[in-house]
Amino acid sequence: MKVSDSRVLLTGANGGIGQAVATALAGAGASVMLAGRSPARLSALARTLQQRHPDSPVDWREVELDQAASIAALANHAAAWNCNVIVHCAGVAEFGHFEATGVDRISQVLHTNLLAPMVLTQSLLPHLRTLPRAQVICVGSVLGAIGLPGFSVYCASKFGLRGFAQALRRELSSTPVRVQYLGPRSTRTAFNSAAVNHYNQATGTAMDPPEQVATALLDMLESGAAERFLGFPEKFAARLNGTVPTWLDGAFDKHRASLPTRPDQPDPSTPSTIQEIPHAH
Ligand SMILES: NC(=O)c1ccc[n+]([C@@H]2O[C@H](COP(=O)([O-])OP(=O)(O)OC[C@H]3O[C@@H](n4cnc5c(N)ncnc54)[C@H](OP(=O)(O)O)[C@@H]3O)[C@@H](O)[C@H]2O)c1
């Protein structure tokens, strides 16, 4: 679809990638409905974009994706606004040892990154099906195609999102609705904690600016491409991992060694209690 013909419901609009996508969409003439949790930040972003691009209508709507009623209200509002594209960009990060991740946190990550985009898509499908053309773009991650040590919960959510996008694309292939999956690699936003930035540095993982992800997303909107990953080594690793995953099993020693210290293990950088006890003579 031409970007200028698109009426995009964008979740996670206040986030680093979300803001870059909103800016690129408005700059290219799309109509945009910014969805997020902070009305103050949403309205400020909408105002700025509207001033810069008066020909691109920008509206906003508050949503809490952890609440079914809030998702339903957003879907109703977006259908009445005649949305023809959903960009699922909201997401939460999770990094660290799996054993140290509580069940509540696992549930929250799966809910926000996987269940919420599924439910929002389902709620809007009756409307999208009535249009001549509609698109659903899931912002996943390259970690939806490669399992990395320290990211088991996050990978589960993004592998799930990618499976959802692939299956639904095939299920809807005879309808006007096209389902797509974009897999950015690590991106410079507040999403990544200091521990993740340290892990990226230690493992030589490249990071892209959010504007690069936005450019790729607009390309996907125009081209209708089914799936796209960002970054050369990541693209190749995603393909290889999809074909012969066990070949890569031995390639992550550096990643494992760069994980934060497990809470049940002593930090090697601090002296142990035994060393601190002075010798008694
Ligand atoms: N940054 C990366 O390295 C990277 C790499 C690959 C893929 N991604 C994916 O790209 C997407 C955007 O990431 P980002 O870097 O822009 O992260 P970000 O700056 O942390 O933004 C995430 C956005 O999601 C929103 N959100 C989280 N939970 C929500 C909930 N329950 N209800 C409503 N909104 C919620 C946040 O809202 P608030 O502003 O209210 O907190 C925030 O605006 C995510 O899906 C992420 O998984 C990121």
Image (cartoon, rainbow, N blue to C red):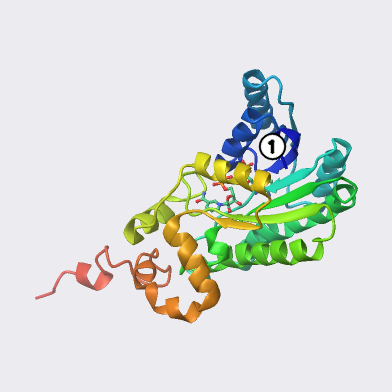
- Viewer can see residue 80: yes
Left or right for 159, reference 57: left
Residue at 69% of width from left, 37% of height from top?
3
- What residue appears at the point 53 percent right and 76 percent down from the top-left corner? 243
Q: Secondary structure at mark 1?
A: helix
Q: Position of residue 61 (x, y in %)?
A: 76, 35
Circle 1 is placed at which residue position? 3
Q: Amino acid at mark 1?
A: Val
Task: State the residue lying farthest toward the left.
Answer: 281
Instruction: Identify the residue shown where x is 89% and y is 37%.
Output: 80
Q: Is disc 1 surrounded by few (<14), some (14 to 19) or many (20+) residues within 10 Å?
A: many
The residue furthest bottom is 246
Q: In screen coordinates, is 200 left or right of 40?
A: left
Q: Which of the two residues, 108 or 218, is positioned nearer the viewer here?
A: 218
Q: Image point 54% across, 45% down: which residue?
A: 213
> Measured from the top left, where is residue 94 in percent x and y?
54, 59
Q: Nearer the viewer, residue 32 or 277?
A: 32
